[in-house]
Amino acid sequence: MSTAPTTAFPTAIAGSLPKPAWLAETHKLWPKWQAEGTELQQAKLDATLLWIKLQEDAGLDIVGDGEQSRQHFVHGFLEQVEGIDFEHKVKMGIRDNRYDAMVPQVVAPLRLKGRVHAVEAQLARAHTKKKLKFTLPGPMTIVDTVADRFYGDKVKMAFAFAELLNQEALALQADGVDIIQFDEPAFNVYMKEAADWGVQALERAAMGLGVTSAPSGRACTTAVHICYGYGIQANVDWKQTLGDEWRQYEQIFPALAKSSIQQVSLECYHSHVPPHLMKLLEGKDVLVGVIDVASDVIETPEQVADTIGTALQFVPKNRLFACTNCGLAPMSREVAQAKLQALAQGAALARQRYGA
């Protein structure tokens, strides 16, 4: 059963949006905060409200918090997990050594300190009538972004993280979140492992979502986002090594098609991914990336509609969502806003073109 809204080609972002200069450093994936303590907490919430309003003004059908309260999409979750040492970070190659990062160490059994994203999720829910999407890092990607000094087995550690993610995801469902998306860029790097156990860990993280007995009375949709990374130089350089066809999806989509996850968010526009690979996701809603996050050039509505038209050759009309290729965090606010407007205008044009 499709989870798509009644509007054809509903629009959404992948997850992150640029942080205002008064909240954090700009144009960075790991920005330093500009304030501390209660002042910082208020600034995070103010930025969340700002981006909800800007997404609505752009005409998006599904909005998110823009990850304004998180310094990084993985570490924003890890900061509320016991058993992780942030005081003694170590340098480690991540995403199969695509780039080095200073990562915290897992040194003891993993447990949640409490709710992770309650404040920003409840704030967002209270201030928009649109469908609300909230993102969490996937268990496999978390494992690839920490140094293990305790478990000695990455599969065991992934399922430990999956249990914690599930606790927060169920709470977000109770908060009234409509879509919970797990971000798994690691699926595009460790394809065999993703098919072997990564999808199973993802399903563990999503267990119990979609149950209408939640206090909110809502049935939460589950999604996974798999892309080729932010528009940072390390990712741009990596893409240049992948050849004329990027076929990573071919190895993991069949496992996802058999899974309980309802939506798959993927990269498409300005990508060398063969579009026909989307056929491997039969039975799923497909969030097609129609906005390039590695370029400051603003897409035209016609280009967005063209990409939707290409995807329609392989995805049923009622299952196609229009999305960004990845997060927009490293971009300027002005470019991000213009791209959101192009996304909404392009989807509207596609509805005219394709009789939706």
Image: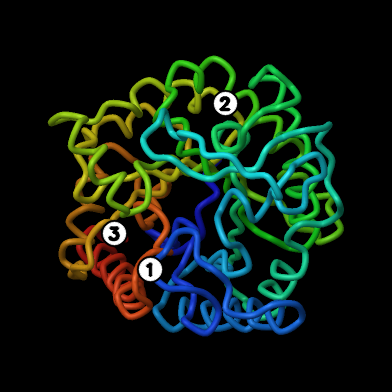
Distance between mark 1 and mark 2 Cα atoms: 32 Å
Amino acid at the residue labelled 2: Val
Q: Amino acid at mark 1?
A: His
Mark 1 / mark 2, whichever is N-terminal: 1
Question: Which residue bears the numbered disc 3?
Answer: 291
Residue 295 percent location from the top left of the image: 22, 61
Residue with the mark numbered 2 = 199
Identify the residue shown where x is 44% and y is 71%: 18
Q: Is residue 301 visible?
A: no
Left or right: 235 in relation to 4: left
Residue 337 sits above or below residue 278 on the image: below
> In the drawing, what numbered circle is on residue 309?
none
Task: Indicate whether 54 appears above or below 209.
Answer: below
Q: Which residue is mark 1?
A: 27
| 315 lies above or below 156 | below
Front position in the image: 105 or 164: 105
Percent across and percent down for residue 147 are 62, 32
User: Residue at horizontal 77%, vertical 35%?
Assistant: 163
Circles 3 and 1: CB atoms closer than 8 Å: no
Q: In this image, 212 relative to 125: left or right? A: right
Rounded to the nearest angstrom, the CA distance separating label 3 from label 1 is 18 Å
